[in-house]
Image (tube, helix red, strand yellow):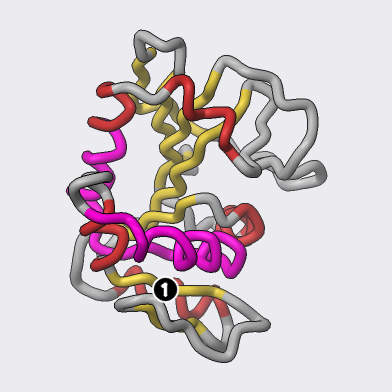
Amino acid sequence: MRKIFVTEFLSLDGVMENPAWTFPYWNDEIAAFKTEETDISDALLLGRVTYEGFAASWPKIKAEKDPFAPYMNGVRKYVVSMTLDKVEWNNSVLIEGNLVEEVNKLKQQDGRDIAVHGSATLAQTLMEHDLVDSYRLLVYPVVVGKGKRLFKDGGDLKRLKLVDNKTTSTGVAILTYEPEKG
């Protein structure tokens, strides 16, 4: 059975939106962590906003400029949207119908894990329905002040277990959590 992991760049105050503030902290340690994600996953699950941003930029990036380009442009992309009629970026599939049912079907397929990048609303919906198997969070030493947060106000209590942690030389905490069972 495939697992779904949510991977996010977060500020100390939990903001994940428009993470341009992460650029000064990027280093080989973060690149290695992100490379590991490409090794353990063979599909992306994306919300419309993240999909549109990725589809507008990644096809223009060549492998010589960014080693993640071949993965991003070639990997299967499942796109959740209530407004898109079609998805045109290479290897993209539009998910229609009941999101929970469709995601459960994806999890039952053979393959490696499925990564959720960005996609705040989608990630929150997956969390509400207990469809997230792990959280791979990169917490940056900045306070943004406003913006979309991964964990929204008013959600149910979710207990998580820390399964891995490291701190990069640039001060980014890399935290991996799994939901507690029972």
Residue 35 falls in image quadrant: top left
In the image, residue 116 lies in the stretch drawn in magenta: no
Q: Which of 57 and 110 is in front in this view?
A: 57
Sort mark 1 into few (<14), some (14-19) or many (20+) by Cα contacts within 10 Å. many
- Residue type for callout 1: Tyr
Numbered-mark total: 1
- Return the residue nearer the eye: 79 or 90: 90
From this view, report whether residue 39 is shown above or below residue 141: below
Asked which secondary structure carries label 1, the reply is strand
Identified at 47% across, 33% down, the residue is 137
Q: Residue 70: x percent and y percent?
A: 21, 58
Q: Mark 1 points at which residue?
A: 78
Q: Quadrant of residue 167?
A: top left
Query: Quick check: 11 left or right of 61?
Result: right
Q: In the figure, is residue 52 to the left or right of 61?
A: right
Which residue occupies 42% across, 26% down?
175
> Going 43% across and 33% down the picture, which residue do you hit?
177
Please indicate whether residue 9 sits to the left or right of residue 13 in the image: left
Q: Quadrant of the N terminus?
A: bottom left
> Majority secondary structure of the magenta segment?
helix
> In x, y percent, where is residue 153?
80, 42
Question: Measured along the vertical axis of the image, is residue 19 above or below residue 4?
Answer: above
Q: What stretch is highlighted in magenta?
A: 33-62
Q: Position of residue 83 (x, y in %)?
A: 67, 83
Question: Could you tell me which residue is drawn at 24 percent across and 67 percent down?
Answer: 74
x and y percent of residue 76 in the render?
30, 71
